[in-house]
Amino acid sequence: MTKLLRWFLFTLLLCWHQLAAAGDDALIDFQGDHYVINVGALNPDSEMTLMDVLMLCPEVLTDNAKMLNGNFILCVDDIDLYMDIETFLTMVKASEVETIDVYTNPSISQGVGGSDGVINIVYKEAEKDGTTGKVALEGSTYGNGLAYADVKTRKRQVSVRGYALGNQHFARGNYLEGINFSQRELVEDAHVSVNWDISPKDNLTIKLFQQFIDSKEYYHNTNDTYQSPIKDRLGELTFSYLRTLNDKGAELLTEVGGVFANFSNLEISQRDASPYFFTELTTPLLIDDLSMIAGWEVNYDNSWYIGLNRQQYLKNDLYVQLNYLHGPWTITLGNRYTILNYWNRNDDEAHKLWSHNRNANSYLVSIGHKWGHHYVQGAFNRDFYIPIIDDFYEDVMGEPMLSTSYETNMVWRTELRYTYQQKNLAIFGSAVHSWKTDLPTPREETTGIRASVTWHQGPFRLTAGANFYHEHCAGDDLIPAQYDNSFTLRLSPALLPGHGWRLSSTLIYHSRQEQYGNHPHLFASLKVNKDLGRHCNIYADFHDLAGMPSMSMELLPYIYHNRALTLGMTYRF
């Protein structure tokens, strides 16, 4: 391991000494509660993907570089994206995207609770009328298959963007001693977004989405085989209206929509309807350098467990955030006040109505300063974990009962960020400490030190990073102290040798805590792309995973197991 650390530090030093001439094109801009990646500053080639860009962000990647961190929500043009995230991030090319907004403190402006973050993808606007798109097909030696298509068209004031995919996963592994697990999962997604510039000051966006998942799980032992079929359907309809109020940047955004779901397995049939509404004003205040975001948001969740109970959940938010941008200084202050109401009625006890009421405040303070190629930012955030329905229950002798001891679980977070940027080099580092209170354990703390660097020169590009975490739960004797520390090293080089070829690779080592059946492991992949003319690209992606944990049943369809070769083709029109 010492040799691996030395080799990694040598790579960072090499990037530093290969510094090019100074330039003013900033790859990363900090804006209070989030930072913005200006994708064009990377000079992306035609096959660089969104996943390649996100390798720069130390907070968002999982251990196998194929999925986002579970604490991050993916959005497109400020609207949640319910799709196979891995497929989306690998199929959308960086050259199609204008910016990527990464919210690490989104509790005020985005209404996300706990330790969650938000990644918002902003596409480039079409410069002229017409239709473009691409179709992709791929398959792997493990038996997985994928069909993907996206299309965008623009005519005068109306533009339409759509995605569709079908993804077949196969997985198998060891669930418990003597029990083997296998799974087949089919995912079908369709997403359509219509953007209409009604007038120079009015814009309407309509989004329609549907997802269908058909999964069958099998558990095998020496005597029997148990099958568990699962069907899940999800739909969403959203209307967003944006009104420009004046020439100084004042805007009023109003959005209404709903998510509808139907889930069933051998034991439970569940239906959900979750409408929501918010209106938000963005306007300068008194001086041009000071702006305000203020809004009201309502979320309602109505869930039916057929034959069991009906649960209702209402959340009202009032929020305000002030942003001061003057010269090299960036200052952000924000507060979100939340009112939570929850009701439950059992079908077999119709007279008995359970209820909960909670109020909570979230706070954000952020100060940043830029000088030359350097930028430093400090932030403090107090937030709470927005409870889900199951949080209001506790198991009493095998029967779910209303929890009378539920508390508003708080999370407190301090963070220090630093960037150094030049024309072809960006160094990005952060130190974060968070602690959670009012949990079953007295206090849960996490300290993280994260760094990444990206450098490109001619046909060569290199992105590398390192994360170190110290996690500890006070009062929890089940986790030995020697498992508190873990680290991740990652390296992602890419080479364009010419004649339509592209070579890229990803290496990630993670010293995962040795508990719950998890072990340190190394993920490695090698991908080769070749252009065939102007419209077609073929690729081969070989990957291996050494030391894969055997108990992560939920992640089995996405980890791709130990070793596989994927072949694919993309056709652009």
Image: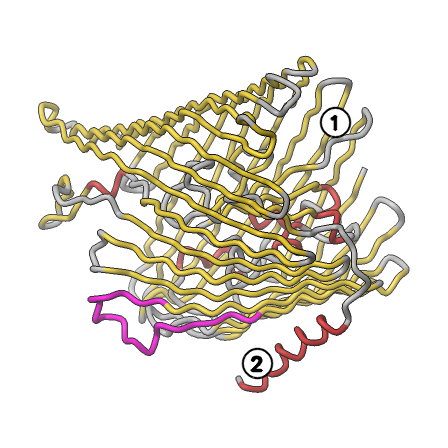
Q: Which residue is labeled 2 in the image?
A: 5
| Label 2–label 1 contact, CB within 8 A | no
Q: Position of residue 11 (x, y in %)?
A: 67, 75
167, 367: nearer the viewer: 367
Q: Quadrant of residue 428?
A: bottom right
In this rendering, the answer to whether 392 lies above or below 280 is below
Q: Quadrant of residue 567?
A: bottom right
Which mark is in front, 2 or 1?
Answer: 2
**In screen coordinates, is 447 left or right of 155?**
left
Q: Position of residue 304 (x, y in %)?
A: 28, 29
In this rendering, the answer to whether 462 lies above or below 146 is below
Q: Which residue is labeled 1 in the image?
A: 153
Residue at the image position 41 percent from the left and 41 percent from the top: 107
Instruction: Determine whether the residue tagged by mark 2 lies in a helix, strand or loop.
Output: helix
User: In this rendering, does residue 125 appear at all?
Assistant: yes
Stretch of the chain drawn in magenta: 471-489
Q: Position of residue 486 (x, y in %)?
A: 43, 72
Q: How is the image coloured?
A: secondary structure
Q: Position of residue 270 (x, y in %)?
A: 32, 33
Residue at the image position 38 percent from the left and 45 percent from the top: 229
Badge 1: residue crowd in 10 Å (few <14, some 14–19, many ≥20): some
Q: Quadrant of residue 340?
A: top left
The answer to whether residue 2 is magenta is no
Instruction: Determine whether the residue tagged by mark 1 lies in a helix, strand or loop.
Output: strand
Q: CA distance from mark 2 to mark 1?
A: 48 Å
Residue at the image position 20 percent from the left and 45 percent from the top: 407
Q: Amino acid at mark 2?
A: Leu
Which label is found at residue 89? none
461, 229: nearer the viewer: 461
**In screen coordinates, is 536 left or right of 319?**
right
The answer to whether residue 481 is magenta is yes
275, 518: nearer the viewer: 275
